[in-house]
Amino acid sequence: MREAASGYYIDFPGNAAASGLLILPLFPAIETLPQRHKPNMTNLTPEIVRNAISDHPDPETGRGLDSMGQIKDIVVDQNHAALTVGLTSHSAPMADELSDALESKIVAAAPGSKVTITYVDHPRPPARIGQIALKAKSVIVVGSGKGGVGKSTVAASLALTLRRYGAKVGLMDADVYGPSIPQLLGLSGRPAVTAQKRIEPVKLGDDLPVMSMGFLVEPDQAVIWRGPMLHGSINQFLGDTEWGDLDYLVIDMPPGTGDVALTLSQALPLAGAVIVCTPQEVALLDAIKAVSMFRKVEIPILGMVENMSGFQCPDCGKTYDIFGKGGARQKAEELNIPFLGGLPIDITLRKAGDEGKLADVIQSDDASRAPFDAICKAVVRELAMRAANQPTKVSLPTL
Ligand code: ADP
């Protein structure tokens, strides 16, 4: 082999024709590459990692993770960053999305980095909200324009899904005209009253407190509500019940009317309303009324859920859009509110509701719970976006 100015001559013994061929290297040697052609590797350091993510908003408060003391540890080994991040149980459903966001910020700051994130619990007790004794971070109401659209199913499933992710949740059935939460969850019994005149809610397992008028009246008894009585009962449910420290209180609202919404909006600041509707045009008209009602009582709207959108036949696998499909998404766009997701007609869900086993479905049926997972994440994402746009003052818990 002989060196040439910009290549190598290779002599092939016995092959005179090919001998002396100038082989030009395809690429110049790596050392001679101009800087811009070198793989863009940055020396990863804990400072680079911290700077990349310090301002990323904590999903709960909307404030920078670093300023909230949630970046617990950063260990760098060559191009691998191992982070320990504190996350409150309120934000637990956002863990995967937060990991993706942090990783992409670190990789943008130091291309070629590998990132591993471990979450640890970041305790942050809720403060007392409103003028009542309730301690909760986010109170979410679930409403609809009319009955029978799956509002209670969505409210109960939202509470169960948040709980499955590790959040501390309470479920209040404010549908005093037709309380169906006890039925959906297979709960019965009467709430006890403590010596301090506080109400002990009925519990699902040992960690989901539930209050419902259904525990206080016989199932076949009709209750006639006068305005002041309704107001008083809702306030008692909210303020006199031993809910414990909650991340979320999910409230199943009565359909259509605004009286309970008005009482709630006067009693405490609500994180927002989820509106459930079915896709057909008449149902959507009712949903629009519900949106307008929540707007009137100044309850922010988190978004719309389309229930019973499509039915997959278990026999032939074909999907039938019995009530139509996509109407709620379109209406949500027109009304300028987020669309939180859709739920198919699901026989498993209907059976579970009738048998009081909704909690079992959310705990262990991957297919039936998947749409609820997506809706739950969409709700928490919506809350996180609002917190980031308007960081709340972190108040000290009331002792
Ligand atoms: P609402 O609170 O709006 O009156 P419910 O949540 O009580 O409605 O639901 C009414 C009935 O419809 C219940 O029997 C429930 O199990 C059933 N249901 C609700 N959503 C679905 C669904 N996506 N698929 C099948 N059945 C459903």
Image (spheres, rainbow, N blue to C red):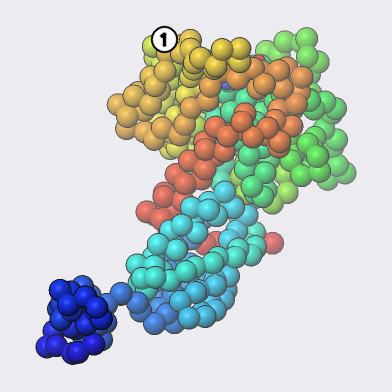
**Hey, which residue is sitting farthest left in the picture?**
5
Q: Position of residue 316 (x, y in %)?
A: 56, 12
Q: Position of residue 103 (x, y in %)?
A: 44, 63
Q: Locate the C terminus and report the quarter of the image it occupies.
A: bottom right
Identify the residue at image location x=52%, y=36%. Answer: 375
> Is 304 situated above or below 310?
below
Residue 234 in view of the camera: no
Identify the residue at image location x=35%, y=23%. Answer: 331
Which sits in the foreground, 163 or 178? 163
Q: Position of residue 337 (x, y in %)?
A: 37, 33
**Hey, which residue is sitting farthest front in the picture?**
14
Q: Position of residue 308 (x, y in %)?
A: 52, 18
Does residue 384 appear to the left or right of 397 in the view shown?
left
Does residue 234 appear to the left or right of 116 in the view shown?
right
Identify the residue at image location x=52%, y=80%. Answer: 77
> Is 258 situated above or below 134?
above
Does residue 132 appear to the left or right of 59 in the view shown?
right
Q: Helix or strand or loop: what does disc 1 sit on?
A: helix
Q: Locate the N terminus and report the quarter of the image it occupies.
A: bottom left
Where is residue 233, by image quadrant?
top right
Which sits in the foreground, 313 or 228? 313
Where is residue 51, by image quadrant?
bottom left
Q: Label 1 belongs to which residue?
A: 282
**Hey, which residue is sitting farthest right in the picture?**
195
